[in-house]
Image (cartoon, helix red, strand yellow):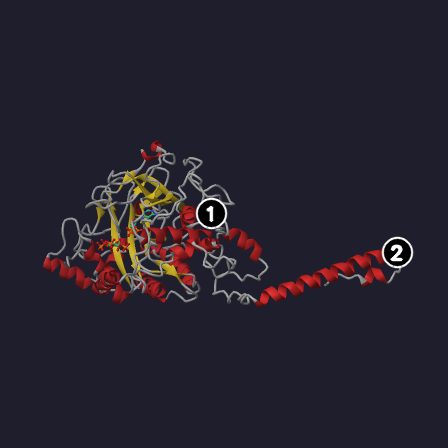
Amino acid sequence: MSHNCIDVAWSGDPLSLGFEKIMARFDKLESLLDAKDRRRGKLQPPQRPDPEPPNGLPDRGGTNWDKQRRLYTQPTYRRPQHHQPDRYPPPPPYQPDRRRPHHLHQTRYGPPPTYRGFPRRQFLEPQHGPSRQPSCWDLPGARVSMGNRDYEDNASIYYPDYDGDSEGYDEDVDVDHDPSSNSQLTGSKGGDIEGYHQVAGHRARDGRLGPLVDDAGRFYKPLQGDERGANEVSFYASFSSNTKIPDHIKSFFPEFDGTRLVEASDGSGMQTHLVLQDLTFSRVNPSIMDIKIGSRTWHQQAPEGYVHRCLKKDRGTSSLPLGFRVSGARIFKSTESGYWEPENRLSIQTLSADEVKLLLKSFVSSNTSEEPHMKPDCAFASTVYGGSNGILSQLVELKAWFEDQTIYHFYSSSVLMMFEKDLASSGKSPRAEIKLVDFAHVHKGNGVIDHNFLGGLCSFIKFISEILTTPEDSSADSLVEDAQRNHIHSENGSVYDVSLN
Ligand SMILES: O=P(O)(O)O[C@@H]1[C@@H](OP(=O)(O)O)[C@H](OP(=O)(O)O)[C@H](O)[C@H](OP(=O)(O)O)[C@H]1OP(=O)(O)O
Ligand SMILES: Nc1ncnc2c1ncn2[C@@H]1O[C@H](COP(=O)(O)OP(=O)(O)O)[C@@H](O)[C@H]1O
């Protein structure tokens, strides 16, 4: 008992004596309760303390713990203005959507039996039994106070369209859908729609869905109908609510607006899409390159078949030798000639080191593939790659975070590199920018540095910095000559567009 009745007892007045008696009774009562607790405690295993948090996670005992916990226990959806009020979870504290059926069914995105370790459940579900409180070890999503809600209710926090039945997402409910907002959506048909610039990834063709954009600056990425889609939503939910990630690092990622049902790119009906910031919005004739970082694009817990497919690709492309591969590119030539694009994706994924260098030079040249016999002039290298706001300095800033962060491991994610040649030509800032995209294969870092991503990033940085420091490097010249000799450049492709199929 810590209260101090001695202070009042010494005075000897009747009021103080009465007070002392009352406090003595309290003492007795409390010791009885203590004894009872001890007896009950013997029947239960001692509660284990939380282990030390890995780097980057808050210490529960720290002074900011309460503040952080409040932040972590609230989903952080920012509702786009055009959405109807019931589209997203109501403001915290979150109340389960009572319209959703309460019966349990198999979820469409349940993990295949052999596929363990995907962090969706780690993000979505509490990592503890009912007797354990969320700890500092739990990722933000798992720190959401789930109470007695079942999986379907939990999922609806991060999957606002999820209706808890076997069909997946709100396929039978139209109340959330604002048909008028869809009229502004534009599909991707190979990147030839003005204002739309997809350079890699799944495209809307051959029966597959592709991303959509609207005229308000949003990019709608269809959720892949398996763990990849669910995983990417979980990552965005976790990442955007993680207060340990500095704002300058968050700005390297597209803003996340939750998920939304929209008409799919193939017109097949309503499908759930990730709603992201459209990174190319408001850009005029941007040149864009997608660089998949890491010599390994798969996580060890991925299904065997998937690992084999990735291994084959990693070995057969520049991923293994260089630590990255160019997944896609679109280089603006001129208003008259339009864009250069590789004839097929494989051709740029399998470039040698010298060919990569040539492509990176061509990316910032004024004579991009217009005159394939000419060496790329690197006219915009210093303004796009160099300078305090240039690509190199942004990459170095990102690298500094990866040297430290152990929260996530990014497999198969890409650096998207962009700038506007028209601006560069007229002596203005070319709006050179890098962003990270594609988080379908991000996993928990568990306190370990993401060496795979970091290594690939360093390698890419080396290529860019070499172009800046030795723009006259002639190692790629022979490629230009070879190309001429062998006539392997095409109308549409450039000298390095060699088909390796
Ligand atoms: O080659 P595929 O058909 O396996 O397609 C790749 C996709 O695999 P999937 O077919 O969905 O299993 C693959 O999807 P995942 O990374 O597995 O989600 C990528 O979309 C990849 O594109 P990029 O390398 O990001 O530009 C896709 O590669 P590219 O088509 O760009 O070569
Ligand atoms: N937020 C975004 N804004 C604009 N374009 C994007 C965005 N995210 C991706 N893209 C474009 O789509 C391509 C594929 O994206 P990605 O997320 O890798 O899809 P996938 O999972 O199908 O591989 C990228 O190379 C880029 O051109």
Position of residue 210 in the picture relative to residue 89 (left or right) = left
Query: Which amino acid type is shown beneath numbered disc 1?
Result: Thr
Residue drawn at (32%, 35%) of the image: 182
Considering only vertical position in the picture, is 470 above or below 149? below
Query: Which amino acid type is shown beneath numbered disc 2?
Result: Pro
Residue farthest toward the top in the current orientation of the protein: 180
Identify the element where label 1 is drawn.
Answer: loop
Residue drawn at (17%, 62%) of the image: 479
Identify the element where label 2 is drawn.
Answer: helix
Neighbour class for label 2 at 10 Å: few (<14), some, many (≥20)? few
Q: Report which residue position mark 2 lands on.
A: 14
Q: Give residue 266's quadrant in the image.
A: top left
Q: Earlier in the sequence, mark 2 or mark 1?
A: 2
Image coordinates for residue 461, horizontal then vertical, percent: 34, 62
Answer whether residue 124 is visible to the viewer in this image. yes
Q: Quadrant of the C terminus?
A: bottom left
The yes-or-no answer for disc 2 within 8 Å of ligand 2 is no
Neighbour class for label 1 at 10 Å: few (<14), some, many (≥20)? many
Q: Report which residue position mark 1 lands on.
A: 76
Residue farthest toward the left in the current orientation of the protein: 486
Considering only vertical position in the picture, is 485 above or below 215? below
Q: Quadrant of the N terminus?
A: bottom right
**CA–CA distance between discs 2 and 1?**
58 Å
